[in-house]
Image (spheres, rainbow, N blue to C red):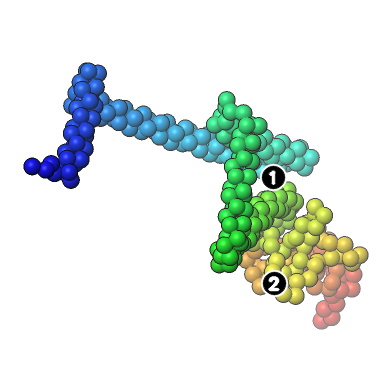
Amino acid sequence: MRKNTTIAPAMQMQRSNHLQMFAVESMRLLDGETAEAKAAREAAEAEAARVAAEKAEADRIAAEKAEADRIAAEKAADEAERKRLDDEKAAKKLTDKEYEFLTDALKHKQAARDAKAALDAANAKLKDFEGLDAAAIKKLVADQKKAADDAKAAELKAAEAAGNVERIKQMMGEEHQKVVSELETKLAEKDNAINAAQKTIEDLTVGSAFSQSAYIRDELVLTPAIARQVYAPHFDVVNGKPVPFDKPRGEPGRTQLVDASGNALSVDAALKKIIEASPDRDRLVRSKIGTGASSKTEKTTGSNGGEDNGLRGAARIAAALEAGALKKAPAK
């Protein structure tokens, strides 16, 4: 009787699989860890990893909150100090020079804190690279880029050899899009840097002029911050100096405000001119008339155009008769 040659190989393969499974199970048993123990160990390790991750996240959130609270406290302290300086200047306890010096010191203090925060953030990022060789990393990145470029060149060469025009066009389009994306990214970074620099320049020029404006402080009902929000678009920064215009930035027919010599008006003079021309002028300019019984009006001259000489009653009438301002009644 002939042997079944098709069944024999299958039986041999099944027997080989059983032997391998037996060997693996035997090794596991020899190691002394059952399937239940392994499952329990893996579950415990997963739980420990979960707890560690939750703790790390909680620590991160707590650190971020503490930092935010510190920044808020410093900002509140700066605002309180600035208000104190403003109050003391208004009360004539500080001269203009003293006020300018102290407010500049406050700005430098804030700038120093911002610089330290940026340095701390940079140092925190550098910790991720501790123990790594910068030259080796650069070489690895360069090697990876070269390998990718070589692979693309080889593929392009193969496509050209095979006459695959569509693939060649596709690869050229991908390379062009890559170059365009890189340029767009660089342009966006440059625009952001320019905008940040422009904002800093505006803060140091227009912002400083508004915060120190005597016209805003003495004549307007607006605070310097609100006045800046409303009227800062009337000013451009040219060669590091604020230049005023009659209309906000972007409006047609915008004209520079200059004096009789053709020089740009000062911020206070320009603000006064802009507000005097505004239909809301009466609501923006602070009223100088007091209220209540203590209110006073300016002195006016007498009916005959002369100045008030301080005389009252009969003495004033006699003086007027003597001066000929009044005619004596005819005798009866």
Residue 90, numbered label: 1
Residue at 62%, 32% in the rendered image: 136
Q: Quadrant of the C terminus?
A: bottom right
Q: Is residue 85 left or right of residue 262?
A: left
Amino acid at dot 2: Glu
Amino acid at dot 1: Ala
Specify few, some or many for label 2: CA neighbours under 10 Å numbering under 14, 14-19, or 20 or more: few
Residue 117 screen position, x and y as percent: 60, 35
Q: Is residue 154 left or right of residue 331?
A: left
Asked whether the residues under the numbered discs 2 and 1 touch, taking CB atoms below 8 Å apart as contact, a structural biologist would say no
Q: Is residue 332 visible?
A: yes
Please tell me which residue lies in front, 17 or 34.
17
Residue 12, numbered label: none
Residue at 68%, 53% in the rendered image: 190
**On the image, which quarter does residue 180 sit in?**
bottom right
Q: Mark 2 and mark 1: span between their CA atoms?
A: 37 Å
Q: Which residue is mark 2?
A: 251
Q: Is residue 138 left or right of residue 255?
A: left
Please tell me which residue lies in front, 276 or 78.
78
Residue extending farthest left: 1
- How many marks the image carries: the answer is 2
Q: Is residue 221 visible?
A: no
Secondary structure beneath dot 2 equals: loop
Residue 118 screen position, x and y as percent: 62, 37
Residue 40 screen position, x and y as percent: 22, 27
Please tell me which residue lies in front, 143 or 89.
143
Residue at 20%, 29% in the rendered image: 19
- Mark 2 or mark 1, earlier in chain: 1
Residue at 58%, 65% in the rendered image: 163
